[in-house]
Amino acid sequence: MGYAKIIALMAIGLLAIAGVIVLKESLWLGENASLRSASDVFLRLNAEELNPPPPAPEFRLKDINGKSFSLRDYRGKVVLLNFWATWCPSCKFEMPSMESLHKALGNKGLVVLTVNAHESADEVKGFFQEHRLWFPALLDEDGDVFERFNVWSLPTTFIIGKKGQLLGKVVGYRDWESDQTMRVLRRLAEDTM
């Protein structure tokens, strides 16, 4: 394994640890704080608010079964767009919580999409089967979508609004099934932001 890969894996591990510490130390707003603005929403998610929100780069990718997906197909819904890889430890930690989020809010206006670069459909399909994941796994074979979204660290997740705008960005591991995160994302899906 190359020196650069070892450093990248160590950095990803440190990001995961930092994410867990933030969650454990309750640095997010208290459970009873009201959501008065978009800034409150992203502060609660410990996410970077993109203000003003730029349009999300459009793309069309195939999933692990060869079905074509376009970001444009999800206008009118909030999209959690996650960039990940099977070799990324933090990605493995957060995938089960993303599945819980998908099950809880998938029929309430929230869509979970994942984008994997440079790995084969068989590798990704095996990972999804092993971890019992049911949300779409899209394949970015040439890394073009990673570049369009300027993804440099894994996992990276974008929150895309109902009108196709990039509302926020989360770099590193998150517990997507926590009560607080579920409430905030449910609010985003129900809101007109």
Image (spheres, grey):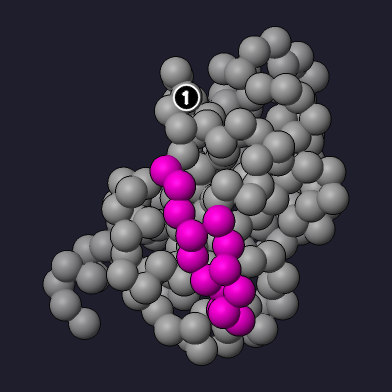
Picture coordinates of residue 106, whole percent (x, y): 79, 52
Residue drawn at x 30%, y 53% is 147
Judging from the image, what secondary structure is the residue with disc 1 in? loop
Q: Residue at x 57, y 79 (%)?
A: 66
Pick the quarter of the image with the N terminus: bottom left
Percent position of residue 192, x then y: 72, 22
Nearer to us in this view, 186 or 87: 186
- Magenta stretch encompasses residue 65: yes
> Is 117 above or below relative to 2?
above
Where residue 91 sits in the image (x, y, percent)? 50, 63
Splitting the image into 4 quarters, where does residue 155 fall? bottom left
* Residue 29 quadrant: top right
Left or right: 147 in relation to 135: left
The answer to whether one can see residue 26 in this image is no
Residue 3 position within the rendered picture, expressed as x and y whole percent measured from the top left: 15, 72
Report which residue position mark 1 lands on.
53
Is 64 magenta? The answer is yes
- Name the amino acid type tagged 1: Pro
Of all residues, the one furthest to the left in this rendering is: 3
Please give the name of the residue rendered at 76% of the width and 24% of the height, measured from the top-left corner.
Answer: 191
Name the residue at 66% across, 22% down: 193
* Crowdedness near tag 1: few (<14), some (14–19) or many (≥20) residues, C-alpha within 10 Å: some
**34 and 122: which is toward the camera:** 122
Start-end of magenta stretch: 57-70
91 and 141: which is toward the camera = 141
